[in-house]
Image (spheres, rainbow, N blue to C red):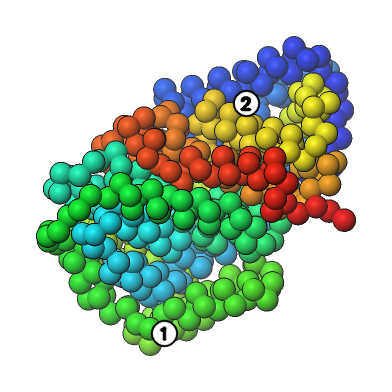
Amino acid sequence: MFQIKSIHKPAFWEAVLLTVGIIIIISTSIIFFESVPHIPILFSILLLFGYGFLKKIPYKRLESGLVEGASAGMSAVFLFFFIGILISSWMMSGTIPTLIYAGFHLVTPTFFFAIVFVVTAIVGISIGSSLTTVATIGVAFIGMAHVLELSLPIAAGAIVSGAFFGDKMSPLSDTTNLASSIVGVDLFVHIRNMSWTTIPAFIISFVLFGLLSPSVSTVEFDTISFFRQTLMDTGMIHWYTVIPLALLFLMSIKRVPAMITLAISSAVAVLLSYFHHTYALSEVMSVLFFGFKSVTGVEQVDELLSRGGMNSMMFTVGLVLLALSMGGLLFTLGIVQCLLARIESALKKASSVIVASALTAISINIMIGEQYLSILLTGQAFRGQYEKVGLANKNLSRVMEDAGTVVNPLVPWSVCGIFIAGVLNVDVLDYLPFAFFCLLSPILTVIFGFMGKTLTHVK
């Protein structure tokens, strides 16, 4: 992707005008017309084609840039397919239900906000989806906070912080896989490198939520107890169901390639599922493609467990390919190079490159409101700059998540912000000051960049 050579040198005002036009098309469509990102990105691609035709660039040259941009995402596409299979197989085996069940056991009246943060983090890592975590266990927690007459903004901040910690650090998360794939970093190398900023942010957030937690001596946590019993009644809660997870960690430590790790863990999970349920081969194939369907009869639990399958990743795959195609055109037409040339003189040090990439990721979230594009466009624009200052690509993938993935829920008009505010019935600006993890992540990544700490340099 980053070897795409520009075939045109636009004037600076043309590059700015096209960039603003794309921002208006995408942000307006998402914010005001509630469109999925795919359609406005496709319109933006057509806008770039129109500009290319005005400059008398042959269609084949433009098409070549489009295809070359999309081809950069093929490794991510295959990873997404295996992620879908892994999630459905871990549901079958009981791995994810067991992790959620264990998390529910941590909930107590003491240090309520801190425990909400930890439990949502566990659930988020288990299922790899922040929005699903918020829409399920998050709704239960916000209801409990309401009954206990506790601060709903703080409770929502704890829920959002935990959910996006899980989304950021889970090997099942599409944003985590996207950030690592787009800059050519192994998935587990990326996750380990994120620990340098993520663990301090987690610890500080946990302490802050603990300090803000009120003293609640007696209360019946009927909802959580009911969820625990419902999970136990599925017959999938067993000690051996954590074997696929342990295997995943072991292979990641041994640095086995991510795709092989996911495939082996999925296969073991399918085999373990036969310890408590007998599946026909046709059922296994269906679950691996269409996802696991929970039938407990409890809507919230069924929504939490009905996940996975290759088919569930098609939305993300389509978005990635479209966004990368647009990126290919932006590079082919020389638009990105033109914009970067104006600030390149200031990007001489590692610290300045990290700050610039972090601000770019945050700005895309604010202007467009889409976290996938924040990750994709930041990675496309700054990979070359990181190489110039001698920084390894895993530094960039970390910044893309620290300032991209976790910032989206802090923007009121973003995809995540609109969804969370609607589900929890708490305005984004109300919970924003208490979403400590999401606020600390970009701050820590910039601070470490200035200090030169935890950075990996290319020898």
- The answer to which quarter of the image holds residue 239 is bottom left
Residue drawn 66% across the image and 53% down it: 180
Position of residue 69 in the picture relative to residue 165 (left or right): right
Q: In this view, does 264 lie above or below 157?
A: below
User: Observer-nearest residue: 388 or 57?
Assistant: 388
Horizontal side of 30 relative to 344 (left or right) equals left
What amino acid does circle 1 point to? Answer: Tyr
Q: Quadrant of residue 32?
A: top left
Q: Where is residue 449 in the image (x, y as percent from the top left)?
A: 69, 43
Q: How far apart are marks 1 and 2 (CA)?
A: 49 Å
Instruction: Reply above or below: 230 against 238.
Output: above
Q: Can residue 325 be seen in this view?
A: no
Which is more foreground, mark 1 or mark 2?
A: 1
- Is disc 2 surrounded by few (<14), some (14 to 19) or many (20+) residues within 10 Å? many
Q: Which residue is drawn at 65% across and 25% down?
A: 46
Q: Can you tell which mark lies on residue 300? A: none
Front-lying residue, 22 or 238:
238
Give the x, y percent position of residue 309.
47, 62
Residue assigned mark 2 = 44
- Residue, disc 1: 240
Q: Is mark 2 on a helix, strand or loop?
A: helix
Dot 1: what SS?
A: helix
Identify the amino acid type marked 2. Answer: Ser
Task: Give the quarter of the figure containing the N terminus.
Answer: top right
- What residue lies at 70% left-to-right and 50% top-to-bottom? 453
**Residue 326 as seen in the image, left or right of residue 32:** right
